[in-house]
């Protein structure tokens, strides 16, 4: 699948999908580990890592700031650093990589000098102002004309000290960004939530685990407050677990076709929040009438397409933040489900309602699925093509953002394309 494709039509398999597919490394953990290794003195070896567009953008930005990064094989990075980020000569352009953009916006405060953090047109519509407000409260010169990238940081080489409030209701990445930079404070830093909600708390737990692996001292004072000591980081060898969000497509494909797909890793090995989607997938075709997607947001597209074949309708709640992902995923899911059959998906406020119909399976409903340059829309709607004839995925190469080998993985299980 190396040639760039405009479209890919999935031929529904005639039998169960059976085989072994190892999901790629976790994007979320890879980008955390790359940054922490870059901030650590010495050489860190990251194994099991994801090589994708998002992680390549993070790695490139770090090399722009003087970090040495080698790639000895397809799943490893060797990161060498003196623990200091240097002012780049050009803006850091991070495409539509949310983790890289948010994490680096805080981290480049440690640079002595001016840094511009920018992205593509889609990224320039994704809000970052809550993080900038928090940075300014620490005395950091952080500005944006629109509240979205591009962001200009005039760093002073340190991260201040004291207590910083952050509204994590829109994205847990703001919280993780502050936490990862906090070990470079002039003294201890307390990071405290100011809003009542925290988007995807499980991702903050991933951040804390990675920070501790690189030598940080973090104490959770209560449900909304963390205290970070000014220790900096130490280089380490770090293994990255497979990507749970990627695994959801394979779990759903197995369930939809009555197959058996060995992921090469036990379920309990996943620490990422999206892994809890496996419990919902296991309930198919009797998924719950209401699914709260707030703590497994990247799994919602998978679950929504699976729900199209459920025995009864499904309402997804707690997903308002999906509107500010790579695209407005609530709208995209409703629109593309209804492209398959009118009324199959609809928006009710910020909820998504899927009008499930098991009889869709086995039908031929020629449909071109618009993917909005969003990898998760492409990968999730491929699942519909396992049961419905005529499903065509437009811009299938957009999966390269997090899972470049996705189409080959399905092909290895017996899926064919036209």
Image (cartoon, helix red, strand yellow):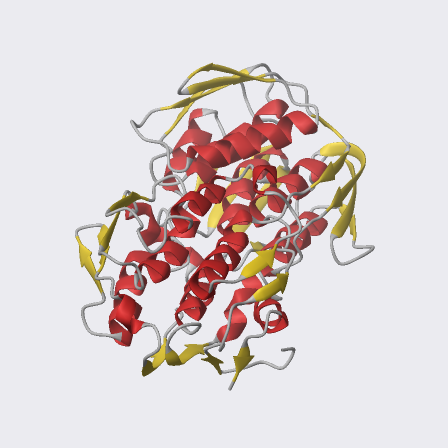
Residue 206 found in image quarter: top right
* Figure check: 281 above or below 331: above
Identify which residue, 268 or 150, lies in the foreground: 268
Q: Quadrant of residue 192?
A: top left
Question: Residue 296, how many percent across, how many down?
Answer: 41, 43
Q: Is residue 385 above or below residue 157?
A: below
The picture places residue 355, in percent across and down from the top left corner, at: 21, 62
Figure label count: 0
Q: Picture quarter containing residue 222?
A: top left
Q: Nearest the camera: 8 or 41?
A: 8
* Residue drawn at 60 percent across, 42 percent down: 29
Quick check: 42 above or below 13? above
**In the visual, does 40 lie left or right of 116?**
right
x%, y% of residue 102? 50, 43
Whether residue 173 is visible to the viewer of this picture, yes or no, is yes
The residue at 37%/74% (across/down) is 370
Q: Is residue 239 above or below residue 330?
A: above
At 29% across and 75% down in the image, what residue appears?
340
In the rendered image, residue 25, in percent from the top left (x then y), is placed at 64, 50
- For the residue pair 57 and 65, the one nearer the viewer reads as 57
* Residue 118 shows in this picture: no
């Amino acid at each position: 699948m190396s040639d760039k494709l405009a479209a890919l039509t999935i031929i529904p398999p005639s039998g169960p999908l059976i085989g072994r597919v190892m999901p790629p490394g976790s994007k979320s953990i890879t980008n955390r580990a790359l940054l922490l290794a870059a901030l650590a003195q010495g050489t860190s070896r990251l194994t099991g890592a994801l090589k994708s567009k998002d992680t390549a953008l993070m790695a490139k930005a770090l090399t722009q700031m003087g970090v040495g990064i080698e790639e000895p094989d397809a799943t490893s990075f060797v990161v060498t650093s003196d623990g200091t980020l240097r002012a780049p000569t050009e803006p850091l352009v991070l495409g539509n990589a949310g983790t890289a953009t948010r994490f680096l916006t805080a981290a480049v405060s440690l640079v002595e000098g001016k840094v511009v953090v920018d992205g593509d047109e889609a990224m320039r519509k994704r809000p970052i102002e809550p993080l900038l407000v928090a940075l300014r409260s620490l005395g950091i010169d952080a500005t944006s004309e629109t509240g979205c990238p591009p962001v200009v940081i005039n760093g002073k080489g340190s991260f201040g000290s004291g207590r910083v409030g952050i509204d994590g209701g829109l994205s847990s990445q703001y919280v993780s960004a502050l936490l990862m930079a906090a070990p470079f404070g002039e003294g201890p830093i307390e990071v405290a939530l100011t809003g009542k909600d925290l988007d995807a708390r499980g991702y903050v737990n991933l951040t804390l685990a990675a920070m501790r692996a690189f030598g940080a001292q973090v104490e959770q004072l209560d449900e909304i407050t963390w205290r970070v000591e000014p220790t900096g980081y130490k280089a380490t060898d770090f293994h990255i677990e497979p990507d749970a969000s990627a695994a959801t497509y394979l779990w759903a494909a197995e369930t939809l076709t009555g197959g058996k797909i060995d992921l090469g890793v036990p379920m309990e090995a996943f620490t990422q929040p999206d892994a809890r989607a496996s419990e919902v997938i296991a309930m198919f075709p009797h998924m719950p009438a209401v699914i709260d997607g707030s703590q497994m947001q990247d799994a919602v597209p998978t679950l929504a397409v699976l729900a199209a074949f459920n025995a009864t309708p499904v309402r997804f709640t707690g997903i308002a933040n999906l509107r500010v992902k790579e695209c407005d995923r609530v709208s995209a899911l409703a629109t593309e489900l209804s492209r398959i059959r009118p009324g199959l998906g609809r928006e009710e406020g910020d909820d998504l309602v899927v009008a499930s119909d098991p009889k869709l399976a086995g039908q031929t409903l020629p449909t071109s699925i618009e993917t909005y340059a969003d990898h998760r829309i492409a990968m999730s709607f491929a699942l519909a093509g396992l049961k419905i004839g005529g499903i065509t995925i437009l811009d299938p190469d957009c999966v390269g953002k997090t899972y470049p080998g996705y189409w080959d993985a399905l092909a290895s299980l017996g899926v064919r394309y036209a």
